[in-house]
Amino acid sequence: MQDQRLKKIADILVNHSTKIKKRERVIISSGVEAKPLVLELYKQIIKKGAYPKIKLGFTEMNYIYYKHASTTQLKHFPKITFQELKQCHAMITIGSNNNIKSLSNIDPKKIAIREKILDPFRPVHLSKKWVLFYYPTPALAQEAEMSIEEMEDFIFNACLIDWKKQEKKQRKLKSILDKGNKVRIIGNKTDISFSIKGRQAIMDYGINNMPGGEVFMAPVETTTEGHIYYEFPAIKQEKEVTDVYLEFKKGNVVKFSAAKNEKLLKSMINLDKGARRLGELGIGFNPKIKKFVKSTLFDEKIQGTIHLALGNAYKEGGGKNTSALHWDMIKDLRKKGEVRVDNKVILKNGKFKL
């Protein structure tokens, strides 16, 4: 993958997403599979006069850890890593998993224990400049049922767009949501509503996610009513939870079902009190992403879809829900469905009406 697109991606991550400045401390986290991109990032950050630190890992380490770690180890808080995070100015994370299913047979309770212990990382992480990018690996391509060449084209096409123009387009949607009081989503086996009064929408135009292409906000915590069905599988802990159905009353999930991995769905909903409430409404806005590839980073940006996340809310827009869980589930509205804000249709059958 040694081509000019690689340099362009690195340039976007350094100069658009994180806006690296002289003397800033930058952590680049990646797997060894993304070596070409890591080296290009390292070079560009050095040229900026900043201080990059590379943290490389192996996909196999996750399996080894969760397979053999004791409860004491799972509950151990990584103080050194935490202090390192607090001292940095920016983080560039490159996902480069060579086995999407490596944790499929790990007890989800062990992962849940670890997620709770690592929860203090979340607010510190969000307070920094940060961006996440997925490097096109064979594993990612296989999961998406693509060749590696097709996966490269898919990722680059979704990322190499004019992000300033994209920001202007998304601002129209943000303006509507910021002034809105109530959202209603209608679709296949779906009729769900909640208040957004007093909340502010947040735009991702390639700042924290690359690719970007999303406008999102936190629903008012106790107002969700109705039901929703997800055509796409909900991905968690490298497992697919299919045909997810959720029913809400007074903001809480009161009924749920899934055709596959329902036990995982149940364990996540029962993770803590906040896991039963919505933490996010997201509206996909990337015109270059049209195919569901079983990777949330891309799938939640599909133009014509929405996603509702169970669990933790982003506090920047006024969200108050707290949870160790944040699980995006994506609803396809392109064939049948609409989003209404104060009874005005803003998205119908996948097309915006702004």
Image: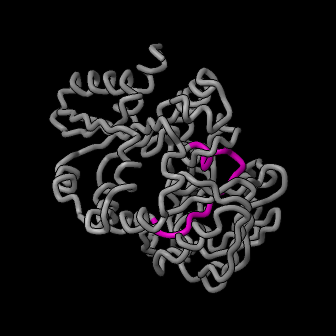
Q: Residue furthest top?
A: 3
Magenta-span inclusion, residue 284 = no
| Magenta segment boundaries in residue numbering | 298-313
- Nearer to the camera, 277 or 148: 148
183 sits left or right of 44 in the view: right
**309 in the magenta segment:** yes
Kindly identify the residue that appears in the image at 49 percent across and 64 percent down: 108
User: Residue 176's x, y, as percent?
Assistant: 62, 60
Residue 41 appears at what percent x and percent y?
32, 26
Instruction: Give the farthest residue toward the bottom.
Output: 250
Residue toward you, 165 or 56: 56
Quarter assignment of residue 54: top left
**Looking at the image, residue 171 lies above or below residue 59:** below
Residue in the picture at 82% in, 62% down: 188
User: In the rendered image of this protein, does residue 353 appear above or below residue 183?
Assistant: above
* Image x and y of residue 101, in percent: 54, 46
Residue located farthest toward the front when viewing the structure as drawn: 68
Q: Residue at x 24, y 38 (%)?
A: 26
* Residue 69: quarter of image: bottom left
Residue 49 in the image, given as x and y percentages of width and height: 17, 27
78 or 280, nearer to the observer:
78
Q: How is the image coloured?
A: one colour
Residue 343 appearing in the image: yes
Vertical order, 245 against 332 (above or below): below
Q: Residue at x 49, y 19 (%)?
A: 5
